[in-house]
Image (tube, rainbow, N blue to C red):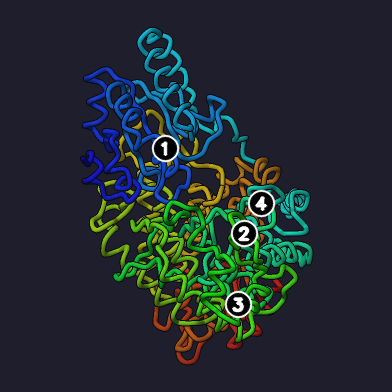
Amino acid sequence: MPNRLLHATSPYLLQHAHNPVDWHEWNNESLHKAKTEDKPILVSIGYSSCHWCHVMERESFENTEIAAFMNEHFVCIKVDREERPDIDQVYMEAVQAMQQNGGWPLNVFLTPEQKPFYGGTYFPPQNWMQLLKQIHHTYKIKRKEIDESAEDLAQHLQTSDLKRFAQPTQTDFEQAQLGSMFHVLVKRYDAQWGGIEKAPKFIMPSIWLFLLRYHAATQNTQALEMVTHTIRQLALGGIYDQLGGGFARYSVDGEWFAPHFEKMLYDNAQLLSLYAEAYSCAPDPIFKEVVYATVGWLTREMMHPAGGFYTALDADSEGVEGKFYTWTEPELQAALSADAEKVMNHYQATAKGNWEHGRNILRRDPQTTGIEPDEIKKLKSKLLAERSKRIRPGLDDKILTGWNAMAIQGLVDCYKAFQDDYFLKLALDTITFLEDYLIQDKVYRNWKDKRSETEGFLEDYAFLIQAYTSLYQVTFNEGWLHNAKIWCEYVIHHFTDASEGFFFYSADTSEALIARKKEIFDNVIPASNSVMARNLFQLGVLLDQEAWKTQARTMTSKLLHLITSEPVYTCHWAVLLSELIHEPVEVVVAGSDALALRAALHQHYLPFTITAGSTVESDLPLLENRLPKSGTLIYVCRNKTCQLPVTDIQKAVEQILSL
């Protein structure tokens, strides 16, 4: 007998639609039910590719005895954290404030007023049943104490992170600050395997994007080596799908060997940017190979026919983590016959298995410096074809605005590095999908067969504005810049906290939760405030909006002590800080060959530049009165002071590097 989740659009909620638990969605009906019946709320938060979410479902939520107790004594609500990251943020912080480890599944007990009083993550079934009974008993006999404790915690959640972490603005941005951050990262760097030295190991692409900029600013070869070594080891490791392309979310060990096999759009979108930028700075055929294979995976397995990208692939298939991606020796022999030994040697597979249960994770020799030989590529294609016959991991086929906008940015960066029109076409197809299905009078969060009614969060708006700004700089289509300006003004109007000068995560028109949060710290996805601050700065330059540039500087300044001392968790702020210190060079290309010269310019690694251009007259501030009567001119300017215009890209690059 299905429960109420049968009518949900979220793939994660639909996974639970046939549980004996009487799950509700988070909505007015379920919240009203808790108040009317005076029952505590159990809110269980996860996402479709979460391995331990599946385990807890199988062990506890499909258990009829446990489900009956949950149904009798609690109002049970399931939340997809990717659809409602605002709910996840509030209750994740609550659980961490209770001195519990955060993670998913996140199971939190609330009063009928939505105020949390206890929570945790995964519980084995016997522990879960014991906890349910304990919560039920305590709620009956100590209700007053629970209400008081929940109220105290709610007050804590309403305290802005900025009250704890922001400091008075410091107006001086200096190169020495970047040096301090570099030395912090050097201390935490894993010189053997790359990455930040700890396990489990997350990639954190913004760290390496910052180091590329640090290298560009200082010519420090160690910074560049840290980036190239890290991303080469990633490409050779088990965290990278050696057959199909694309990266898993993280490695459980320090060697990038054994991944947690879920593959997320947001990781791969950012890694396209990282590999493309690294290739522009230090051309390595492995980096190019990774970009093309990862885009191949995205278009083959993650793309809606109309152009948007899906959210994630599960770690599990047939109830086993990694089964789809790993191989036993007999499976390799059956697929490749006499050639199996070559592939086993190349990918370090063994007869006993290099992982668990006799299975092999495919990885390449970490000393490898070149791309794969043609013979291996042919055998790899055979293996990929054989793998495609297997039962596939679950696909979360909802389409998220913010993550798709990140993919647009990644594809634009690939287009700049490789000048392959295919990447630009994919980026344009994706923005068309978003405009057709998710953008109207406001930006909406997600789509699956129909648009959800949840308004986009700051993450969605910020990455969308970034995508529009980047599309303008490679196409010179002023419509993209116009859209970036419209949504930037919308964010300022609907998300600003005037008292602190930062942006709330949800709009003033969104559903009110017990706390309205701001996202400050960068993590595997950059903080929406750091992305928005960078948007303000870049659009401030392109549109001559001094107030926007000032706000970006002020936001960065208030967090400067944190950025310089903790660059791992402020790594996207660090990227912005490097751009504030090395004020961007405005490169204006005007004339009949503007697009061709733009293409040649963007093959150079010039991170401290912002590009504008046109083949016709334009009233954009950077382009006014710049169109020559014939030919094409390149203007290199900083702070509205320009060098003599040139017609040759090499001369323009020399001017840029001399400023």
Q: CA distance from mark 4 to mark 3?
A: 27 Å
**Mark 1 and mark 2 in contact (Cβ < 8 Å)?**
no
| Badge 4 or badge 3: first in the primary sequence | 4
Disc 2 target residue: 579
Amino acid of disc 3: Ala
Image quadrant assignment for residue 352: bottom right
The amino acid sitting under disc 4 is: Asp
User: Earlier along the polypeptide chain: callout 2 or callout 3?
Assistant: 3
**Discs 4/1, front:** 1
Pinpoint residue 128: horizontal percent, then vertical percent.
44, 27
From the image, tell me which residue sits under label 3.
Answer: 340
Mark 4 closeness class: few <14, some 14–19, many ≥20 residues within 10 Å: some
Q: Earlier in the sequence, mark 3 or mark 1?
A: 1
Residue neighbourhood size for the residue with mark 2, other residues' Cα within 10 Å, grouped as few (<14), some (14–19), many (≥20): many
The mark lying in front, picked from 3 and 1, is 3
**2 vs 1, front mark:** 1
Q: Residues within 10 Å of mark 3 (few under 14, many from 20)?
A: many
Which of the image's four quarters has the N terminus?
Answer: top left
Residue 354 quadrant: bottom right
